[in-house]
Image (cartoon, rainbow, N blue to C red):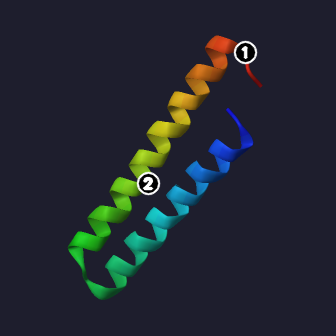
Amino acid sequence: MGLDDDIKHNAEDMKGKVKEKVGDATDNERLQAEGMADQASAKVKKAGDDVKDALTDDR
């Protein structure tokens, strides 16, 4: 996985965490759900990149 991808995925995860916390603080269920979805998306992308790296031995 390239460093650019790693940074993008971590930024998406952090954005999701912030959205979820703001949603918690404001009692906004839509924002909470968006935050959780962003985090899940980032985790899936990270896992996909890890699998790709394992198969191509691109470290």
- Disc on the earlier residue, 2 or 1: 2
In the image, residue 17 lies at what x, y percent? 47, 66
Direction from residue 24 to residue 16 in the image, left or right: right
What label sits on residue 57 in the rendered view? 1
Q: Which residue is mark 2?
A: 39
Label 2 vs label 1, nearer the camera: 1
Is 49 drawn above or below residue 20 in the view shown? above
Mark 2 in CB contact with mark 1 (< 8 angstroms): no
In the image, residue 49 lies at what x, y percent? 58, 30
> Residue sitting at 40 percent across and 56 percent down?
38
**In which quadrant of the rendered view does residue 26 lie?**
bottom left
Is 24 drawn above or below residue 34 in the view shown? below
Direction from residue 1 to residue 17 in the image, left or right: left
In the image, residue 2 lies at what x, y percent? 71, 36
Is 30 drawn above or below residue 2 in the view shown? below
Count of numbered labels shown in the rendering:
2
Question: Which residue is at the far top?
Answer: 55
> Residue sitting at 67 percent across and 32 percent down?
1
> Residue sitting at 33 percent across and 78 percent down?
24
Q: Secondary structure at mark 2?
A: helix
> Residue sitting at 37 percent across and 64 percent down?
35
Question: Which residue is at the front of the view, 8 or 43?
Answer: 8
Instruction: Using the numbered discs, state the Cα–Cα distance from disc 2 to disc 1 in whole angstroms.
Output: 26 Å
Q: Amino acid at mark 2?
A: Gln
Q: Amino acid at mark 1?
A: Asp
